[in-house]
Each structure stands twice: as structure tokens, then as C-alpha cells.
Amino acid sequence: MLLQVRDLKVTLQDQGQRLRAVRGVDLDLAAGETLCVVGESGCGKSMTALALMQLLPRGAELSSSKLQFDGIELSKLSRHKLSALRGRRISMIFQEPMTALNPVFTIGDQLRAVYRRHTGVSSAEAQARAIEVLESVGLTNAELRMKQFPHQLSGGLRQRVLIAMALMCEPEMIICDEPTTALDATTQAQILRILKEAQSARKMGMLFITHDLGVVARIADRVAVMYAGRIVEHGSRAAVLRSPAHPYTKGLIASVPRPQDGGTGSKRLASIPGNVPAFHHEDPRCPFLSRCPKRMSICTREAPPVRQTEAGQQVACHLPLDAQEALTA
Ligand SMILES: Nc1ncnc2c1ncn2[C@@H]1O[C@H](COP(=O)(O)OP(=O)(O)O)[C@@H](O)[C@H]1O
Ligand code: SF4
Ligand SMILES: [Mg+2]
């Protein structure tokens, strides 16, 4: 297994209070596989990704019983070994393209620097590699683009540059945090295709964070549905999208506007009534309790059991599985 995560917890400092942003997450990712982590804004998706990269904000506390990449325990690595791994064997495409690029250096400076830091090759070799990768992500006039600064590029071009930067050293695993959210549908489709091509060429493992179920339907092998710091349902793309079992997953899928209902056809999540709660204390009960239309009295007292459905996904809920299947029907 390329990535194995067990009982990952992230606690942040939030105006003097401890905010439990990630509350016991398990993840596995194999080489060549795409795992989509899906959930509304504020569910802890980005903090999970940043914890894997060991790039959490200042003051954050991280704990886990296992945080292994290719058998290497990431939480025990020295800073030096971590920075040798990041960008080379593991890459991340961040949610904000502008914050991930340095405004005072040209695109070329930044691409060459990443490659030279990890490989020690000459500037000319790094230049050749940068042009090759920029062209592979669909940038025309790559040589000219290399001389430009980030603010001179459109959002779509900047995102391609970030993908190029992440792919420069041919990583074995890539973490993509909502890389296409700000882009128009055509650019989004092109970027997904580029990522999938790069993945299949090298059997790269891809952890893809999104709140867009249309993206999930296109690229996922497996899906982990995240809610308020926990994974509430996890299984193959077909199982989770065709026969969702957890009431939260059902809510997400039901809230996708359908064109025939006068929606825009965009597969963005519309809202489920209520907000994602913030947890300041340990609470073993179901995270969806405050919004769940199927809530029962046992839900207010006991932690939900994790069970396997007939379609093979795992779901953390008190509802009997036969009732869940009936709900699906
Ligand atoms: N730098 C930060 N300091 C304190 N709290 C934060 C910080 N960044 C995010 N949070 C909070 O952590 C929780 C999880 O955030 P995040 O992982 O960014 O969610 P998502 O990526 O799923 O939208 C949210 O409640 C958010 O408000
Ligand atoms: S455990 Fe209870 S509150 Fe949580 S999703 Fe299932 S039915 Fe709803
Ligand atoms: Mg996020």
C-alpha cells in the first residue's frame, strides 16, 4: 500500500479554543489508484491533506497511530528527510493557486528551482524538463510562459503551472485539494484529463479532494465521504454513488441540482439544511446527529457502529442496513 493512515487527528487553535478539525480518519491508497475525499466546506478535508504533507498551520496538533507513505512513518521523519520527500515522491496541488506560487519569481524560476533542488541537475536540464512538463499539461508557448510572473497568467493557466510543478519530479503520489473548483467547465475537464493521463503513465496514487460529485463520478476508483472531521462512508465509486448508505451521503447526492428540475446542471453541492458543526470536545457520537433527518434516540447516546453494506461500502450509522437499503430503493 502506498499510503496508510490510521486514526489521524488534527486539533487547531481557534480563538483560544481547541478545534477538532480531523477526528480519527483512516485512509488507504494504492499505486495507480484514485481516492476521492468528498464533503462540504469545513469538514476537515484540507486539514487532512496538510497533515499528510506535514504542512499544518502553526499551533496545530497532529496525532495518528499510523501515517505511512511506502512504509515510511511520516510523523517521525526529520525536517530534512521530509523536504526531500515532498515535491519529489509526494506532491500536492493546493486549493489556492495564487498562494502556492511566489509572485516575485517567474514561472520558469520556480519550476527550475523545484527540479534542481531534488535532482541537482544543471539549469539547462531543468529548463528542458520544465518546458517538457508545461507542454504535457497543455501550455502553448511554454518557453515564453516561463518568463512570465504568476499574475500575468489566467487562473486556468496558473493551475496548469501548479500541476506542472507537482509533476516535475514524477511523484509516486499526488494530493490534489480542489484543484479545479475555481475553473470553468472546459478547463476543469482538460485538467482532470491531464491528471488522469499523468497518473496512468506512472501508476501514480492520487488523493483527490473535492466537493463536486460530478468530478467524483469521472475520476474516482474509491470514495471517502467526510463529515465534521470523520469519514462516514467509504467504498467503491459505484457503491457510494449508486447506492449511498449514510444519510449524509444521501443528502449530498440528493442536493445535486438536476437540469430537469431547473438546476444549472452544475454538479456542485447545494445545501443540506444546517451547517457543519465545529467540535471543541471529544464526542464519539455520530457527527451528522444535529442535521440528520433519520436520527433515532440511540444516535444521541452511542457511537455509530461501522458496517459493511451488500454493495461493499463501509458506513458508520445506527440505521439498520435493511432500512438503509429500503431508503435507497
Ligand atoms: N488556520 C486555521 N486555524 C484555525 N482553524 C482553521 C484553520 N483553517 C481551517 N480551520 C477550520 O478547520 C476546520 C476544517 O477546515 P478545512 O480542513 O479547511 O475544511 P475543508 O477543506 O473540508 O473545507 C474548519 O472548521 C475550519 O474553519
Ligand atoms: S447514526 Fe443516527 S444521526 Fe447519524 S446518520 Fe445514522 S441515523 Fe443519522
Ligand atoms: Mg479545503
Image (cartoon, helix red, strand yellow):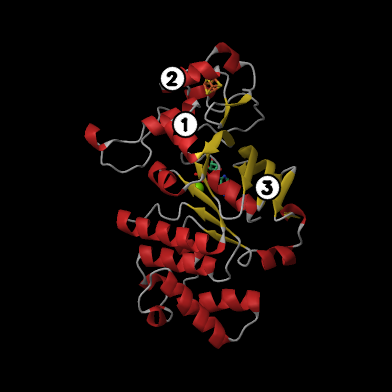
What separation in Å lies between label 3 and label 1 (alpha carbons)? 24 Å
Mark 3 residue element: strand
**Can you identify the residue that label 2 sits on?**
327
Q: Residue at x 49, y 16 (%)?
A: 323
49 or 234: nearer the viewer = 234
Mark 2 residue element: helix
Q: Position of residue 272 (x, y in %)?
A: 40, 30
Question: Mark 1 vs mark 2: which is more N-terminal?
Answer: 1
- Label 3 Cα neighbours within 10 Å, binned few <14 / some 14-19 / many ≥20: some
What's under tag 2, amino acid-wise? Answer: Leu
Q: Does residue 293 appear in the picture of this structure?
A: no
The image shows a total of numbered marks equal to 3
Q: Position of residue 290 (x, y in %)?
A: 51, 23
Residue 23 vertical placement versus 147 (above, below): above
67 left or right, relative to 141: right
- Label 1 Cα neighbours within 10 Å, binned few <14 / some 14-19 / many ≥20: many
Mark nearest the camera among 1 and 2 is 2
**Can you identify the residue that label 3 sits on?**
4
**Can you identify the residue that label 1 sits on?**
249
Q: Where the C terminus falls, by quadrant?
A: top left
